[in-house]
């Protein structure tokens, strides 16, 4: 009985310590006033006054402020657009890779899987800096293209949205490939043969059988890319330059440049609320898949 | 499953009524499928070795053999998933090598059933018809007809994982029959079913085959199943057909020791043949023992090595020497296998040879006539055994 309780309690304790408590702190800060102090806000909540007093004088001015300055909703929208676009791009690149892996000879598959995971062995930051070296005006890509005579003037890629998309697709590709590969790997090859036997061409069999049966993998991969990209900060700030507006960057600037912790926290709370919808959809997809597999 | 409405073929695989179904003996018939010197190699491995075979319309043809004998490769070549390395396969007189699987009037029922898990039973059956752009009303009528034929009406809306193994097997059959193929291929169709269900389903398959008039080619490693359902059986080994004939002839007149041994239980006595009159031979099988007599239409040279194959149920066991038996040998009961309806006595002859004799247990077991270590006589007629060269 005790063991069972411990077993169930452990993940909840983890969730409480590493998600709910920090979130409560952020929520508390988002309801405070900014101040020139250390920490730079005046708490509205204290244990002496209690929760009742706190709720009675609830101050939502930071959230109201987010609606007044169009920077914020533009940043949210731009983040959503970039997240959706990069999810689609990652899917377009990732699906063929996963498909090729699943159809590769059995003895190659562990190696191919290794190659997909290999980038994680290096620091993420170093890999993004490497892309700066590749994409800059004097970078390897431009040198190569100039060298083979494909272009006469260097292309400006770095500090544009193109660079952001390249960086995001590169970074998040494994999260797309792995769930799709796992769905395709489980696909019974005789189903494709059955489809062909019943009159499908190769392409029809792919659309009517392979795609529907790998759908749980596609959905899982899309969420695994979409959710973190929405709040992405490092890639747009290093590769995107000042022209790329993303909420992660806005949050960083509010927090560290403006030292406006309450507004930064309000931005974070809204971001979390936006993410709840896809996270719930993702969980439902995983659950449905688990049920179908029984 | 109820018994089929039409009279089932007898256990010998022939139609019980006057018009005997034997198109392979009719020179006027032209075969539906023709394998002509077909060889299939996978790298170094030869799966099918220079094979020639005719299969006729409306036949229920069984490919029987141990795993790796090439039977599945033959089926996959008919379906279009493999192409022959050498030789020609004809369907209705047309070389099928250049025709892709989706353009052949051939459908296959897969061993794993290969039902589409994301589609309902109804949609699975309609899948092939949709590819033909069949008008909606005809399509619905055809699917309903298939559902009725396989008695799946109540399960039309279910997904494959929501029905039993036997029902899945019937969905797979309905789906492969829906397009009314000229030829239906069945790859171990009953392999996943338990024994009782399998026996019922065998009759169901025969019934459906007769109702639809489709030519069936079935792959199986279960000899009983092949004998039950098939009009002809091809026994395969190492990419070759050893013998292709009706179940009765395969059983009663095997052409080789391999076939005799593969189908059913058999005693093999090795010896040397000496001609002894018209189609009669004397077989010297052990030093100091009376030679056996056997008849054979095949010629054996004097002193040629031979194998005498006798089915255990054709060997009679008795305590005294039968007076008029053509062959009689004495031995000691070494073992008794009790199968309920039958008992098989393993009798050790002098010199160590063990001969099996099978008797029907018409009496209660407590009154069994012979027991372990009893000295008994085994006897059989001159025509009971088959004399084989190898």
Image: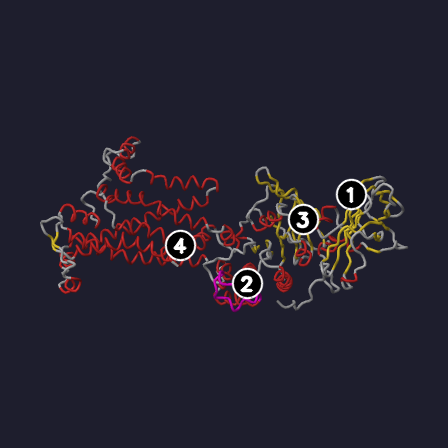
The residue indicated by pointer 1 is B389
Nearer the observer, B25 or A181: A181
Residue B158 lies, in percent from the top left, at: 48, 65
Report the span colored magenta. B149-163
Residue B253 lies, in percent from the top left, at: 77, 51
The residue indicated by pointer 2 is B167
Mark positioned earlier in the residue sequence (3 or 2): 3
Seen at 32% across and 45% down, the residue is: A172
**Is label 3 or label 2 in front?**
2
The residue indicated by pointer 3 is B53
Nearer the observer, B270 or A25: A25
Mark positioned earlier in the residue sequence (3 or 1): 3
Numbered disc 4: what chain? A
Q: Residues within 10 Å of mark 3 (few under 14, many from 20)?
A: some
Whether B76 is among the magenta residues is no
Numbered disc 2: what chain? B
Do tags 3 and 1 sit on the same chain? Answer: yes
What kind of element bears circle 3?
Answer: strand
Q: Is residue B326 left or right of residue B128?
A: right
Residue B87 lies, in percent from the top left, at: 63, 43
Estimate the spatial distance between the alpha carbons at disc 3 and disc 2, rounded to whole Å: 34 Å
Q: Residues within 10 Å of mark 2 (few under 14, many from 20)?
A: some
What kind of element bears circle 2?
Answer: helix
* Displayed quadrant of residue A270: bottom left
Mark positioned earlier in the residue sequence (1 or 2): 2
Estimate the spatial distance between the alpha carbons at disc 3 and disc 1, rounded to whole Å: 23 Å
The residue indicated by pointer 4 is A215
Numbered disc 1: what chain? B
Q: Decide: is A212 above or below A234.
A: below
Estimate the spatial distance between the alpha carbons at disc 4 and disc 1, rounded to whole Å: 61 Å
């Amino acid at each position: 009985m005790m063991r069972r309780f411990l077993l169930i309690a452990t993940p909840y304790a983890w969730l409480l310590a590493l998600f709910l408590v920090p979130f409560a702190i952020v929520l508390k800060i988002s309801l405070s006033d900014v101040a020139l102090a250390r920490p730079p806000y005046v708490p509205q909540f204290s244990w002496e006054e209690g929760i009742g007093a706190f709720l009675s004088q609830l101050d939502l001015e930071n959230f109201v402020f987010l609606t007044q300055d169009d920077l914020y909703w533009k940043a949210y929208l731009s983040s959503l657009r970039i997240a959706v676009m990069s999810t689609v791009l990652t899917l377009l690149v990732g699906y063929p890779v996963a498909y090729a892996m699943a159809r590769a000879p059995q003895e190659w598959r562990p190696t191919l899987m290794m190659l997909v995971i290999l980038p994680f062995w290096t620091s993420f930051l170093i890999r993004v800096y490497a892309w700066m070296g590749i994409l800059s005006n004097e970078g390897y890509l431009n040198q190569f293209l100039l060298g083979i005579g494909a272009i006469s003037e260097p292309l400006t890629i770095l500090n544009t949205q193109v660079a952001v998309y390249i960086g995001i697709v590169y970074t998040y590709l494994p999260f797309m490939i792995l769930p799709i590969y796992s769905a395709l790997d489980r696909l019974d090859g005789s189903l494709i043969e059955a489809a062909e036997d019943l009159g499908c061409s190769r392409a029809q069999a792919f659309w009517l059988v392979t795609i529907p049966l790998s759908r749980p993998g596609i959905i899982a991969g899309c969420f695994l890319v979409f959710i973190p990209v929405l709040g992405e900060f490092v890639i747009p700030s290093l590769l995107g330059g000042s022209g790329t507006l993303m909420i992660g960057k806005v949050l960083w600037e509010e927090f560290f440049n403006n030292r406006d912790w309450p507004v930064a926290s309000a931005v974070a709370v809204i971001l979390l609320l936006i993410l709840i919808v896809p996270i719930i959809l993702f969980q439902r997809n995983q659950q449905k898949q688990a049920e179908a597999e029984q | 499953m109820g018994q089929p409405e039409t009279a089932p073929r007898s256990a010998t695989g022939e139609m019980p009524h006057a018009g005997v179904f034997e198109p392979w003996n009719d020179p006027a018939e032209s075969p539906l499928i023709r394998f002509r010197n077909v060889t299939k190699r996978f790298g170094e491995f030869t799966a099918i070795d220079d094979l020639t075979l005719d299969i006729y319309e409306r036949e229920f043809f069984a490919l029987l053999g141990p795993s790796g004998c090439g039977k599945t490769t033959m089926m996959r070549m008919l379906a279009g998933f493999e192409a022959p390395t050498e030789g020609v396969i004809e369907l209705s007189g047309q070389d099928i090598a250049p025709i892709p699987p989706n353009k052949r009037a051939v459908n296959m029922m897969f061993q794993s059933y290969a039902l589409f898990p994301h589609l309902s039973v109804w949609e699975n059956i309609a899948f092939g018809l949709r590819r033909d752009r069949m008008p909606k009303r005809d399509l619905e009528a055809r699917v309903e007809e298939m559902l009725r034929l396989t008695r799946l009406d109540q399960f039309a809306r279910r997904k494959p994982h929501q029905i039993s193994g036997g029902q899945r097997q019937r969905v797979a059959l309905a789906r492969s029959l829906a397009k009314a193929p000229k030829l239906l291929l069945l790859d171990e169709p009953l392999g996943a079913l338990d024994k009782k269900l399998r026996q019922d389903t065998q009759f169901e398959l025969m019934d459906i085959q007769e109702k639809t008039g489709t030519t069936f080619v079935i792959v199986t490693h279960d000899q009983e199943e092949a004998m039950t359902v098939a009009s002809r059986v091809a026994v395969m080994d190492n990419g070759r057909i050893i013998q292709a004939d009706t179940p009765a002839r395969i059983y009663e007149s095997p052409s080789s020791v391999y076939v005799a041994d593969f189908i059913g239980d058999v005693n093999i006595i090795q010896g040397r043949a000496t001609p002894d009159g018209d189609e009669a031979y004397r077989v010297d099988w052990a030093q100091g023992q009376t030679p056996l007599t056997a008849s054979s239409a095949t010629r054996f040279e004097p002193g040629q090595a031979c194998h005498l194959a006798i089915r255990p149920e054709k060997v009679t066991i008795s305590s005294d020497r039968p007076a008029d038996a053509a062959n009689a040998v004495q031995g000691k009961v070494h073992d008794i296998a009790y199968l309920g309806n039958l008992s098989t006595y393993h009798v050790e002859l002098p010199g160590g040879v063990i001969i099996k004799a099978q008797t029907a247990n018409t009496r209660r077991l407590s009154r069994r006539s012979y027991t372990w270590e009893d000295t008994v006589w085994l006897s059989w007629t001159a025509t009971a055994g088959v004399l084989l060269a190898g």
